[in-house]
Image (cartoon, rainbow, N blue to C red):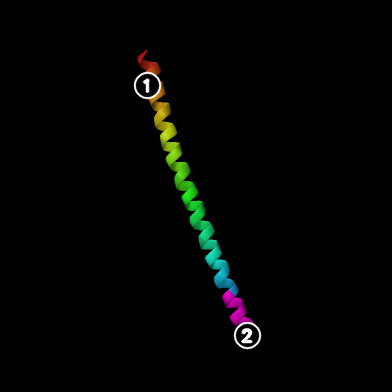
């Protein structure tokens, strides 16, 4: 029974660590998506300026 309690605690700890890692990756993805949108907008503006010339 003691082993079951230890296993449960270990699994809870691993679960919490996995959630932290997931949230970290989600933040990173959001930052990359924002950077992508900004870069895409800058590219579109540059293309438009070149087309106008």
Quick one: which residue is furthest to the bottom in this view?
A: 1
Density class for disc 2 (Cα within 10 Å; few <14, some 14-19, many ≥20) is few
Which quadrant does the C terminus fall into? Answer: top left
Which of the numbered marks, if any, corresponds to residue 2? 2
- Above-or-below relation of 35 to 2: above
Image coordinates of residue 15 in percent, x first then y, are 54, 67
Residue marked by disc 1? 48
- Residue at the spot x=57%, y=76% of the render? 9
Density class for disc 1 (Cα within 10 Å; few <14, some 14-19, many ≥20) is few
- Residue at the spot x=54%, y=58% of the render? 21
Q: Secondary structure at mark 2?
A: helix
Residue 45, image quadrant: top left
Residues shaded magenta: 1-9
- Above-or-below relation of 52 to 20: above
**Alpha carbons under labels 1 and 2: distance apart:** 69 Å
The kind of secondary structure the magenta stretch mainly shows is helix
Q: Is residue 37 left or right of residue 21?
A: left
- Residue at the spot x=48%, y=47% of the render? 29
- Residue at the spot x=42%, y=32% of the render? 40
Which quadrant does the N terminus fall into? Answer: bottom right
Counting residues from the start of the chain, the first of labels 1 and 2 encountered is: 2
Quick one: which residue is furthest to the top in this view?
A: 53
Image coordinates of residue 10 in percent, x first then y, are 60, 73
Q: Is residue 43 left or right of residue 18?
A: left
Q: Secondary structure at mark 1?
A: helix
């Amino acid at each position: 029974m003691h082993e079951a309690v230890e296993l449960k605690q270990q699994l809870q700890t691993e679960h919490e660590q996995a959630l932290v890692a997931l949230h970290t990756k989600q933040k990173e993805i959001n930052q990359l998506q924002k950077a992508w949108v900004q870069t895409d907008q800058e590219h579109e503006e540059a293309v438009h300026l070149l087309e106008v010339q």
